[in-house]
Image: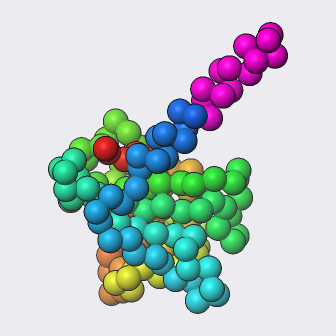
Amino acid sequence: MSGLRSSWPLLCAVIGGTLVVAACGPGDAEVAYWSNGAGQNEAVESYAGSEHCDWQDLTFLHIDWPLPGQTGPAGNRQYVRDPAGRLAAEVRATYAPRAELPADARTTDYTGPDGQQLWLAPSDSDNLAYVVYPDSQRVEAWPRTTQTLGCD
């Protein structure tokens, strides 16, 4: 019985984490899988936030971590395009609509549905992902969320 009591906090954390992830999804939004040309087409996905939560102006980016060439513990990372800063308390950095790529930024070879490319920089991939649009004149910095977000 004491073994069960000592494992109770871990069990609660696992169940709680599962519930948070279960509530986090595209809901009624269409998921766009980003392609890397090497058959790994479900490691990066994006979708609009749910309208019923009034998040339709947000775009979420989920990454199965680590991508090739990246390091860090295995898991999922979520970044968000949030021009109005509505989720400012829930992110590790600030969204930047006109960003510059850091000197160490490299392409991940993942391309989104509109031709945008995903770039990461080892110096700040824990906080930001860079989305480079096809015209290469626009780079956005999308902040990483502090936890996986979703709405019910």
Image quadrant of residue 66? bottom right
State the residue at coordinates (56%, 79%).
41
> Residue at 69% of width from left, 54% of height from top?
74
Task: Locate the C terminus by quadrant.
Answer: top left
Position above or below: 126 against 139: above
Q: Position of residue 58 (x, y in %)?
A: 27, 58
Extreme residue in the top direction: 2
Q: Quadrant of residue 122?
A: bottom right
Tell me where the magenta segment starts and ends, as one range. 1-14
- Which quadrant, please, contains the N terminus? top right
Q: Residue at x 52, y 83 (%)?
A: 35
The location of residue 145, given as percent across then percent down, is: 44, 46
Image coordinates for residue 87, horizontal then vertical, percent = 30, 43
Residue 2 in which image quadrant: top right
Horizontal and vertical percent for residue 147? 48, 41
Whether 139 is drawn above or below 151: the answer is below
Closer-to-camera residue (143/18): 18
In the image shown, does 4 or 13 lie closer to the viewer? 4
Magenta stretch containing residue 81, yes or no?
no
Rendered residue at 47%/82% (across/down): 111
Check the image and report above or below for 111 versus 19.
Answer: below
Nearer the observer, 17 or 38: 17
Numbered label tally: 0
> Predominant secondary structure in magenta?
helix
Left or right side of 45 for 81: left
Question: In the rendered image, is residue 16 in sight?
Answer: yes
- The reply to whether residue 136 is visible in this rendering is no
* Colouring scheme applied when the structure was drawn: rainbow
Taking 76 as reference, is 69 above or below it?
below
**Residue 9 included in the magenta stretch of the image:** yes
